[in-house]
Amino acid sequence: SRLDDNINVGVKRGGIELITQVIRDPNTEPDVLAEACAALQNLALLEENLPKITEQDGIRLIISAMKKHPMYPNVQKKMCGVLQNLAINDLNKVMIAKEDGIKLIIFAMDTYLTNSDIQLNACGALMNLALNDFNLEQITKEDGIKAITLAMSNHADKAGVQKYACAAIWNLSVNDNNKQTIAAEN
């Protein structure tokens, strides 16, 4: 496909290293930063690129940028999206949690309640992150269930938000305590 061809060209030219340099630069404008993360989001769709992104310290850089730019919804949206794709990998799930990624994803959800794009990407990220027992507990501890159900309520007309939110709830509900919390959530 055209996307796969473009992804491969970017990797062959050292695109991941170049993109992470843009994210690493403290003077990068938020709009440029968001697009750099969008590029990483697409590159992360190829499993073979995941280790290349982590070798470039991609997860730490993304989370650091989320912390630095909390008031830029486009940055938060793209960061949640790239974390969603990176969290497909089990080692990345652990690293994202270790770097406070779960807390930042939920913070973005709480900050931008009416932004369906952020809610979509954040629910997708939590959906993937919840497939790890430690992360499942951390998502619950950080009020992630409440954030997910709120996203469902606020964006009832958005099929993508509903899909990822339901999948996240499904993954979180493997824990018996979470079943009670989910059932009681308004």
Image (cartoon, rainbow, N blue to C red):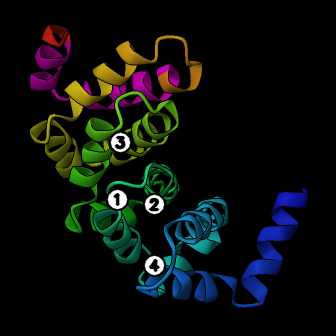
Mark 3 and mark 1: Cα distance apart in space: 10 Å
Disc 2 to disc 1: CB gap under 8 Å: yes
Q: Earlier in the sequence, mark 4 or mark 3?
A: 4
Mark 4 and mark 3: Cα distance apart in space: 19 Å
What type is the residue that disc 3 sits on? Leu
Side (left or right) of 80 relative to 174: right
Image height of 182 relative to 115, above or below: above
Disc 2 marks which residue?
89
Which structural element holds mark 2?
A: loop
Q: Quadrant of the C terminus?
A: top left
Q: Quadrant of the N terminus?
A: bottom right
Mark 2 and mark 4: Cα distance apart in space: 11 Å
- Tell me the crowding category of disc 2: few under 14, some 14 to 19, or many 20 or more residues within 10 angstroms, Cα based: some
Disc 1 marks which residue?
93
Mark 2 and mark 1: Cα distance apart in space: 6 Å
- Tell me the crowding category of disc 4: few under 14, some 14 to 19, or many 20 or more residues within 10 angstroms, Cα based: some
- Say which residue appears at 49% left-offset and 67% top-offset: 30
In the picture as drawn, the residue positioned furthest to the right comes out as 2
Question: Is residue 174 among the parts visible in the rendering?
Answer: no
Disc 3 marks which residue?
126
Whether residue 176 appears in magenta in the rendering, the answer is yes
Q: Earlier in the sequence, mark 3 or mark 1?
A: 1
- Say which residue appears at 45% left-offset and 33% top-offset: 115
Disc 2 to disc 4: CB gap under 8 Å: no
Query: Horizontal and vertical percent for residue 184?
Result: 13, 9
